[in-house]
Amino acid sequence: MYTHSPIRLLVVEDNFLARIALRGAFEALGNAQIVAETPFGQDALRLYREHQPDVVLMDLRLRGSSGIHAIQEIHRSYPNSKILVLSHCQGSEDVYRAMQAGARGYLTKEAEGRQLTEALQVVATGGRYIPASLESLLAERIPTANVTPREQMVLELLAKGMSTSDIAKRIDIAEKTVRIHISNLLDKLGARDRTHALVLALKRGIIHLDM
């Protein structure tokens, strides 16, 4: 059952023009009202506490703190919070991490207004909303591909063109240990070599180009 009163929104989005566009769209449609907004992930919990919104519309790439961390903070303090991710990130790991953190829905920024309206209504009334295309990504996610924080760091440094010795110096471990991490990554990702591992990690959202 959908709610008919305007949904009170907290928008956590780092792009100013995107926030303006969302405000204009919701004012025109009359189905949601933005009660607070911020480009900073670290402000999300404070604004949630102050405004008690029906739904948080959350980007994953924010200033200061990641969207995943902001979702975790809100969900930890308010387990019944309703968070809908709206992001350009669409790898299986992006979706998985957001839902594991406590989000109730996930949309890409390419979604049409009608789909965003539907997602907001579903999430606001306690439902879970993920488009079929993203559900299939989650279904295809390889359970053994859980990359550890240290392995992710190695991937990020590889993506920056660093050598094994450079990585070892950067994170203060032995070169042999770096090679072990890389070997584990190849196994976990099902990759042929380092380059293939980076391609797969980018595609799945494990790492991003603008790290």
Image (spheres, helix red, strand yellow):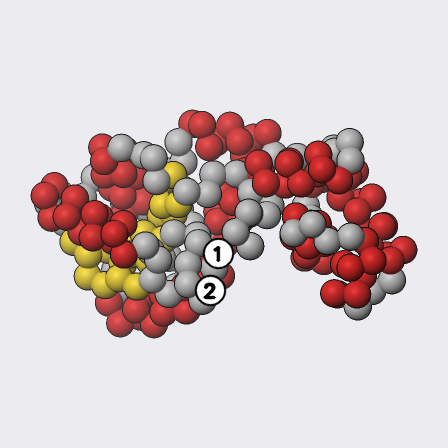
Q: Secondary structure at mark 2?
A: loop
Q: Quadrant of the C terminus?
A: bottom right
Q: Where does label 2 land, which residue?
A: 65
Asked whether, in this view, residue 6 is left or right of residue 183, the answer is left
**Is 16 in front, or is 121?**
16
Q: Residue at x 19, y 56 (%)?
A: 34
Residue 82 in sight: no
Q: Where does label 1 land, which residue?
A: 68
Q: Secondary structure at mark 1?
A: helix
Quadrant of the rendered image containing residue 193: top right
Q: Residue at x 38, y 52 (%)?
A: 59
Q: Residue at x 78, y 59 (%)?
A: 166
Q: Residue at x 31, y 44 (%)?
A: 123
Amino acid on which the number 2 mark rests in the picture: Ser
Asked whether, in this view, residue 182 is left or right of residue 101, the answer is right
Q: Quadrant of the N terminus?
A: top left
